[in-house]
Image (cartoon, helix red, strand yellow):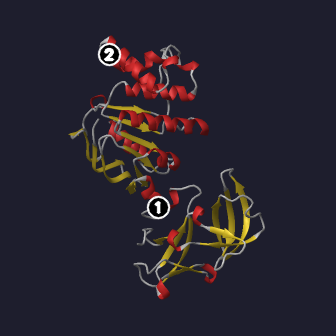
Amino acid sequence: MASIDITDVRKAYGNVKILHGVDLTIKDGEFVVLVGPSGCGKSTLLRMIAGLEDISSGEIKIGGKVVNNLDPKDRDIAMVFQSYALYPHMTVAGNMSYSLRLRKIAQDKIAKAISGAAEKLSLTPLMERRPKALSGGQRQRVAMGRAIVRQPKAFLFDEPLSNLDARLREHMRGEIKKMHQDLGATSIYVTHDQIEAMTLADRIVAMNAGIVQQVGSPLDLYDRPANLFVAGFMGSPAMNMFEGVYRAANGGSVELAQGVVVPLAGPAPTADGTKVTLGIRPEHVLVGKDLPGGIAATIDLVEPTGFGTILHASAFGSDVKAFSLERGLAERGDTVHVQFPVERIHLFDTASGSRIG
C-alpha cells in the first residue's frame, strides 16, 4: 500500500473553476472519505488521482512518486465505480481474474488470489455464476473482489453504493469496512451521504464548491464543525441554526428574534454586537411541558422513527427541531418549552460562516 499526497491541486474547464487548490495527505493504510453535495468536486478529485482527469495545476504523488503524467494503468490503483461494469458473458471467477490474466500472471497465483478475495467477500458459492444471476449487492462485491485481487497501492471508491436500496447499502457499508480492516488498504471513498462518511471513515474531507472545508475524524466534524457548511451538512436531522446578535454583558449571550436571550458558557472571542449564528443539534435540545427558563414553543409535527421521535416546533418565530428517545413526549398542537444547554451550543460568525471559539 502507499500514501497519497495532494498539493495545491486545481481543476478548470476553460474559465469554469472546479477545484480551488486542494491540499491533502492520505497516510498509508488510511480510509479517507470525500463528502459533500453534488457538484462540489469530490468525484473530479478522485478521477484526477486515478488519472481519468487531467490536472490543471498542482501535484499528486502516490507512494512518493509524482503521477501527474502517468496513465491510469501505470498508477497501480484499483477503482470501484457506482456502476458495477462487469462483463456479462464471464462468470464471477472470470470477472475477478480478468486483469490478472491480461498481465499474464501464472494460473496458480491467479487461482490463489481470487480464492482469497472470494472468501473475504463471501463469494465462494457464486464463482460460476454470471452477473445476470446475481443481486445488486453480489455484483458490487464482485466489483470489489476484482479490485482486491490486483493488490494495488490504493483503492478508489466512487459512490459504489448509490444504486442499492437502503437495507443493502447498510449491509455493504459493513462489508467495505471489514474489507478495509482485513486488508489495511489505503482507500479513498467518495459519497454525498454523510451517514456513509461517518460510519466508514478514519478521516473525513468535507468539500463544498471545490474547496476543502474541514478535514478530521468523523467525531471532529460532528462535535466541532469548522463552519456553517460543515455544521449543516453533517448530522441527521440537521443542526438547528438561529441568527442573532452576540451580547458580551453578563458572561456572554446571544439575542435571538423576539427578544429571546440564550446564555453562553462564557465570553466569546468576538465583539459585542456581532451578528452570529447559534447552532444546536436536535438531539441536544431539551423538550418538556415545564422546563424552568425554557422557551415557549408549539409542536407543529411529530415524526416517530421507532428508535426515537423527531419533534418540529415553532418558537420565537423560528423552526426548532428536537430529537428525543422518549415516546409520547408531545403531540401536534401541544405547547412545550425548549431549552438549549450551554455546553451543547455552537457559535458561528454569520458573515464569514466560521466557527467562533
Q: Nearer the viewer, residue 73 or 20?
A: 73
For this view, does 138 lie left or right of residue 149? right
Question: Residue shown at 51%/50% (left/top)?
Answer: 194
Residues packed near mark 1 inside 10 Å, few (<14), some (14 to 19) or many (20 plus):
some
Label 2 vs 1, first from the N-terminus = 2
Where does the C terminus fall, quadrant-wise? Answer: bottom left
Quarter holding the N terminus is top left
Please identify the quarter of the rendering in which residue 271 is found.
Answer: bottom left
C-alpha span from label 2 to label 1: 47 Å
Under circle 1, the secondary element is helix
Q: Position of residue 55 (x, y in %)?
A: 30, 43
Residue highlighted by disc 1: 223
Amino acid type shown at disc 1: Asp
> Residue at 63% across / 68% down in the picture?
286
Please state if 49 lies on the left or on the right of 332 as rendered.
Answer: left
Q: Do the residues bearing badges 2 and 1 touch, measured as CB atoms within 8 Å? A: no
Q: Of the numbered discs in the image, which one, if any, rests on residue 109?
A: 2
Q: Is residue 329 left or right of residue 17?
A: right
